[in-house]
Amino acid sequence: MREGKMLAIFEEIQNQFNHANGGVYIHIDDFKNFYMPLINYYINDRERRSIDSYIIGIQGPQGVGKTVFATLAKTFLKAAGYRVETISIDDFYKSNDERLKISKKYIGNPFYQISRGMPGTHNHELLFETLKKAKAAENFFIPRFDKSLISGRGDIAKDSTTINKQLHFLILEGWCINMPSREDKFLSSVKKNGYVKSIFNNIDPGREHFKLVLKYLKKYQKIWHILDSKTFIFAKNISWTTDWRKEQEKKLVMSKGQGMSDKEVNRFVKPFIPFSYFIYKELVRNNNENHCLIEVGRDHTPKRMYMPSKKQNLKFI
């Protein structure tokens, strides 16, 4: 799609996008230099490969801006005439009762004493079947998860969304999208960063509990194989994710009256940090040839980008 047309569409959707994201503003220069080439890549890649229903996976740590970008891509593609929908892996969480059973079953495993998020707390089979139906242009429904329920533990919402038309694009976003399940690779990755290593050693000093996370994750690999494109949004400093999550929870409390306290956020976020860094080291730093990458700063604005069609030489730390 030509640059002029894409910029015109962006100007048309700015107000709609800002409203959908609680006032989040994307500067036109950031759109032109980062998001526009990425969205155009999706459009061209779908056409080049003759894919009817093109599924985009968006991965990033907590608070990095996955949902914001997914909403931008959806709003833009719809305005450009495409049929598009977004889903989050969070929408496929198991019920609070089911997650409590997992927590009690693995009472000694700290990674499963947080309310949700780890592999195994999602209905991964339902997600897999949903993506297959989308690919086959079959009707499907998207469950919804309300994170504000049960004092921030969250539970399955009563409402859901039914899709009864073939989509041109389906966007799946989540923190663990495309995460591999190699134990040896995980351990070699987390020890390379002092901050991450310290957190991991405090949570799992015997280096045993993380294995259950990766065991569950093996069941998710078939989901990653369905994805046609994989985009990774990452922060230069992994420690920012805690502050970002606190900001998210404060907004949730303001909008719905319930959410996690700062203390609860600290406890909730830390178990994810070693795995988020694992994804960064294995997929972003070491295997970036086939993925779209965006690095964001502390203020969430994009700083650098890599796409398969543009062989930029990024220096990752």
Image (cartoon, grey):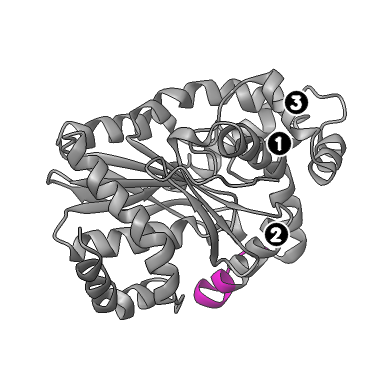
- Along the viewing direction, whichever of 273 and 293 lies nearer the viewer: 293
In the image, residue 317 sits, relative to residue 178, either above or below, namely below
For the residue labelled by badge 2, is the local secondary structure a helix, a strand or a loop? Answer: helix
Provide the residue designation for mark 1: 111
Q: CA distance from mark 1 to mark 2?
A: 20 Å
Q: Is residue 47 left or right of residue 161?
A: left
- Along the viewing direction, whichever of 137 and 38 lies nearer the viewer: 38
Residue 313 inside the magenta-drawn segment: no
Dominant SS of magenta comes to helix
For the residue labelled by badge 3, is the local secondary structure a helix, a strand or a loop? Answer: helix
Provide the residue designation for mark 2: 240
Closer to the chain start, of discs 1 and 2, is: 1
- Along the viewing direction, whichever of 297 and 315 lies nearer the viewer: 315
Q: CA distance from mark 1 to mark 3?
A: 16 Å
Q: What residue appears at the point 35 percent right and 64 percent down from the top-left corner? A: 72
Amino acid carrying label 1: it is: Phe
Residue 258 inside the magenta-drawn segment: yes
Amino acid carrying label 3: it is: Leu
Image quadrant holding the N terminus, namely: bottom left
Mark 1 closeness class: few <14, some 14–19, many ≥20 residues within 10 Å: many
Q: How many marks?
A: 3
Q: What residue appears at the point 19 percent right and 66 percent down from the top-left corner? A: 79
| Position of residue 267 measured from the top left corner of the image (x, y, whole percent) | 75, 51
Q: Is residue 209 left or right of residue 213?
A: right
Q: Which mark is residue 187?
A: 3
Magenta-drawn segment:
251-260
Q: Is residue 81 left or right of residue 113?
A: left
- Along the viewing direction, whichever of 308 and 299 lies nearer the viewer: 308
Closer to the chain start, of discs 1 and 3, is: 1
